[in-house]
Image (cartoon, coloured by chain):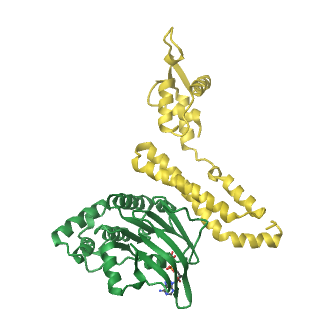
Amino acid sequence: MLEALGIGLSYGATPALRRIDLTLAAGSRTALMGPSGSGKSSLLHCLAGILVPDRGRVMFDGQDLTGLSDRERSALRLRHMGVVFQFGDLVPELTLIENVMLPLQLLGVKRAAARASARDLLGELGVADVADSRTGAVSGGQAQRAAVARALVHEPRVVLADEPTGSLDTVNAEAVLDAMVALSTRMGVALVVVTHDNLVASHLDDLVVLRDGMLDLSAREAVG
Amino acid sequence: MSTSTTLLALLEPGPAHGYTLKRNFDQWFGRRRPLAFGQVYSTLARLTRDGLADQIEVEAGHGPDRRLYRITPDGAAAVDDWVFTPQPAEVFATSTLYARVTVALLSGRDVTDVLARQREAHLRRMRELQAARRQATGAVLLAVTYELAHLDADLRWIEESGTRLDTVRRHLDRTGGGHA
Ligand SMILES: Nc1ncnc2c1ncn2[C@@H]1O[C@H](COP(=O)(O)OP(=O)(O)OP(=O)(O)O)[C@@H](O)[C@H]1O
Ligand SMILES: [Mg+2]
């Protein structure tokens, strides 16, 4: 469903990814681990079509993302992907529920229906009580959970989440991962979760480890 | 885990027969390794001899199953003592993993591979435990999350060791500690 074919990426002179090959099947659940600076966020952003690699291709359902215009990639991402950013990117002027409604509204869903779906999802992620608070008035962990809800609300093909539980304690992280896994099963969504936390990784079926911009093949279990 | 003290503690709510004790023990503590009946009765005999439990009733003409055991005040004190005395923290170190990694290092074997294999085994078990945790309640939830937390600690050490290998190898080379 989503595939990286020999992708490489540099920031100026800094190589961040070197020849990464990775195949993610529909409905699969993969943890992406590795030391700080190993290229996890860079890889996730390439898979999401937010960054275009310098070399190689990223295929989504047989379509080469690197050959699309920015606008085409954004449209494809809006419809088929959900992204949770490492440092959050909820719109601060909006409430949590308004943030979660956004993808649906951009896809043309009516306001009332979008609100109902968003509220359900915030409930499943345990933050229904702060749904009407502004992003700046909730805790880091509550904002992260809203970001996860926003990534799932339109039932995409794949959710790419960068440390979605970085601000959560073990028990709350567990609840978020339980919800993500349950929702991904119900919706048939594939998950890619960047994490430093083995407990988070143990919710997912496959493990991919990055080291210095390369896949650590010794740590990589057979995918699929 | 002290089997005899946990068995004794199961008598605290009230007197019980050997088979009830075994059933309770298996439910709370013996999910992986149920207790043998023989061990239940030998343990109860020892506890009785030591004055930590006693028999309050033997129905004539029946087998050993009819004996009812009761905890004594000394027994309750022994449970108190066991529960509240912290264990020496050293017992929580799993030394076999450390030993295997060290032997690999000293003998020039592929340590990265040793660590990778163990990580895979740990993660496989952790995935099973996560699945069990989602269904678990009560004491099982505590048992499952205890095991998860310990495997997590091992994995963190495995990961960390991977990034320390170069430093450790350089030191071994300098001091002639290994043939790698
Ligand atoms: N915008 C940027 N400009 C220049 N260099 C960058 C930029 N973003 C990342 N890098 C570099 O690229 C490499 C990979 O970074 P990346 O953010 O992908 O790592 P990461 O694995 O996500 O790390 P962390 O666990 O700390 O989030 C690092 O060396 C980093 O310094
Ligand atoms: Mg990152």
Q: Nearer the viewer, residue B159 or B59?
A: B159
Residue B109 is left or right of residue A27, and the answer is right
Q: Which residue is at a point 29% across and 79% down the rendered structure image?
A: A91
Name the residue located 32 percent from the left edge and 58 percent from the top edge: A186
Closer to the camera in the image, A43 or B33: A43
Instruction: Identify whether B71 is placed above or below A64.
Output: above
Task: Reply above or below: A1 against B48.
Answer: below
The correct choice, above or below, for B21 with respect to B59 in the image is: below
Query: Can you name the residue that lies furthest to the top here?
Result: B61
In the rendered view of the protein, which quadrant contains the N terminus of chain B? top right
Residue B124 place in picture, x, y as percent? 53, 54
Query: How many labels sit on residues?
Result: 0
| The image quarter in which residue B110 lies | bottom right
Q: Which chain is green?
A: A
Which residue of the protein is positioned furthest toward the right in this rendering? B176
Q: Is residue A165 visible?
A: no
Q: For residue A63, which quarter of the picture? A: bottom left
How far across and how far down the image is residue A176, in percent? 38, 61
Q: Residue at x 69, y 69 (%)?
A: B165
Question: Quadrant of residue B74 in the image?
Answer: top right
Q: Nearer the viewer, residue B100 or A142?
A: B100
Chain B's colour is yellow
